[in-house]
Amino acid sequence: MPRIEAVGIKTFEALAGRRLVLEIEDNGIDILHRCGGFARCTTCRIEVLDGDPGEMTERERTRLAREQELAPNIRLSCQILCEHDLKIRVINRLSETDLSDAGPRVLEDIDATGK
């Protein structure tokens, strides 16, 4: 099981092959995911401080390319499958906003289109 360290928040064991955003949320961290895991927004972005998050999906690459001035270690947690130990910083948390919810529950299937 991959070990995920969300710096300053908590460390937990993740289910291998599961979306990182779901593991973060299901381990009690209030990460935002406003588009529901379809790489349409960037609210679930994380900073990868150490470890291998794997290759970017085409959706993630396309979405992040539209952003200006993002560091190369910024990734979308909805597009990462937990395969390796990671040390991350969660960038957007519900508790730090005035939003009423984090967003729609992200589906387990990373290949879901949301259409």
Image (spheres, rainbow, N blue to C red):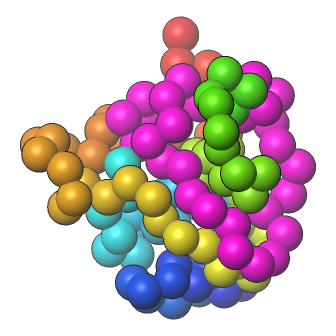
Is 86 contained in the magenta span?
A: no
Q: Find the residue positioned furthest to the front.
A: 69
Q: Residue at x 82, y 43 (%)?
A: 56
Coordinates of residue 25 in the picture (x, y in percent): 39, 63
Position of 53 compared to 19: left or right? right
Q: Residue at x 45, y 59 (%)?
A: 91
Q: Find the residue positioned furthest to the right.
A: 55
Residue 38 visible in this rendered orientation of the protein:
no
Q: Main secondary structure of the magenta part?
A: loop
**Near-viewer residue (34 or 81):** 34
Coordinates of residue 6 in the picture (x, y in percent): 51, 79
Work out whether 68 lies above or below 95.
above
Coordinates of residue 94 in the picture (x, y in percent): 24, 54
| Location of residue 57 (image quadrant) | top right
Residue 5 visible in this rendered orientation of the protein:
yes
| Location of residue 86 (image quadrant) | bottom right
Q: How many marks?
A: 0
Work out whether 58 lies above or below 51.
above
**Near-viewer residue (109 or 12):** 12
| Magenta stretch, residue numbers | 33-62
Coordinates of residue 87 in the picture (x, y in percent): 66, 80
Q: Residue at x 39, y 84 (%)?
A: 9
Q: Residue at x 51, y 83 (%)?
A: 7
Position of 55 compared to 84: left or right? right
Q: Quadrant for the N terminus, please.
A: bottom right
